[in-house]
Structure formats: structure tokens, C-alpha cells
Image (cartoon, rainbow, N blue to C red):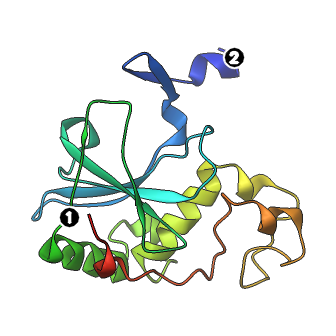
Amino acid sequence: MNASEDILDIEFDNVVMPYTEMATVGRDVNNNFIVIVNPDTGRNNAYFKFCNHQRYDRSTKVIRLDFKSSKYYNHKGDGKYLWRINNSEVKMLLEFLNDRPKNILYRTFKTNWELAIFHWNNECGFTDDPEYDESFPEGCNPNSTLFRNPQFVPLNQRMSDYSTLRF
């Protein structure tokens, strides 16, 4: 089997998205939500998705939240509605992002926020870039071309205050 046979695709409204470009940061079965990263090569921003079901395929509402500021992007392309999260849902999300990852494979990360950044950069291919270097707090030399890429999220990126979101 060659490498191209290993790639699975998901089709949403005639848009084919490579399945290999999605990573689950974590899910909360008690509160029924999931946080994932799913880079879109057609977008020039860095974001994660917060979905209203613990399984993405069963969610009906999704919100894309920017990694670098407290803004959101309307989710389009797969029939899911924009999740206009309320204060209690924001609180739930922030608690999750500040919690330690539950998956034993990711226990080296202090928070789900750090894990989300890692997954984003990994799914974008930045972790394979020769300029990627975890010896820098940012994940690369601040003068590198990687650091200037709008999709790259510095490893030391502070979490935005998503409680200021307005719909």
C-alpha cells in the first residue's frame, strides 16, 4: 500500500477534507462536547473548534475560536450551525482548556490549551519544519519565517479571554 492509499477523506457539501488533518484535543462526556483542531488550507488564520457533542460527526453546532485573539469565525461547509456559546458554555470551555489532558499519551502537556496548540502546529505540518525548535519558548526563533506565518501558533501563546465574545 502506498502513502496515498492511507489517506481518508470526508466529504461535506462537495468539499473534500483530508481526514488526516483533524486531531482531537479532548472531549467531555459529562458535558457532551469536543474540542478539535482541523486546519483548512484555504484559511489564513489559526483556530480550534468547539462542538456541541462529544463526537464531531454527531454535533449540530460548532464554533471556530481564534488561537490568538478572542474572536470567532462562522463555521461553514458541513451543515453545522454556528454555536453561539453562552456564559456557562464559555466557562465550561475555559475549565477544559485549563485542565490537564486526560489521555496518558499527552500527560507531558500541562493543559489542554498547550495540547491544542501542539495539535494545531502538528496538523499544519509546522512541527516537521526545520525551523521548528522547542528550545525557544515560541517553538522557533522569533526571527524565523515560521514565526511570521499567520497560521503558526507560538507554543507560549496566552489563552484569549473568550468570555468577551459577542454574537
Q: Which of marks 2 and 1 is nearer the N terminus?
A: 2
For the point 52% across and 77% down, which residue is it? 108
For the point 13% across and 76% down, which residue is it? 88
Quickly name the residue at label 2: 2
The reply, left or right, for residue 21 in relation to residue 146 is: left
For the point 68% across and 22% down, which residue is it? 3
The location of residue 69, given as percent across then percent down, is 50, 74
Looking at the rendering, in which quadrant would you find the N terminus? Answer: top right
The reply, left or right, for residue 84 in relation to residue 149 is: left
The location of residue 102, given as percent across then percent down, is 32, 70
**Along the line of sight, which residue is nearer the eye, 118 or 81?**
81
For the point 31% across and 73% down, which residue is it? 165
Residue 65's place in the image compared with 22, above or below, is below
Quickly name the residue at label 1: 85
The reply, left or right, for residue 130 in relation to residue 58 is: right
Disc 1 marks a residue whose amino acid type is: Ile
Is disc 2 placed on a helix, strand or loop? loop
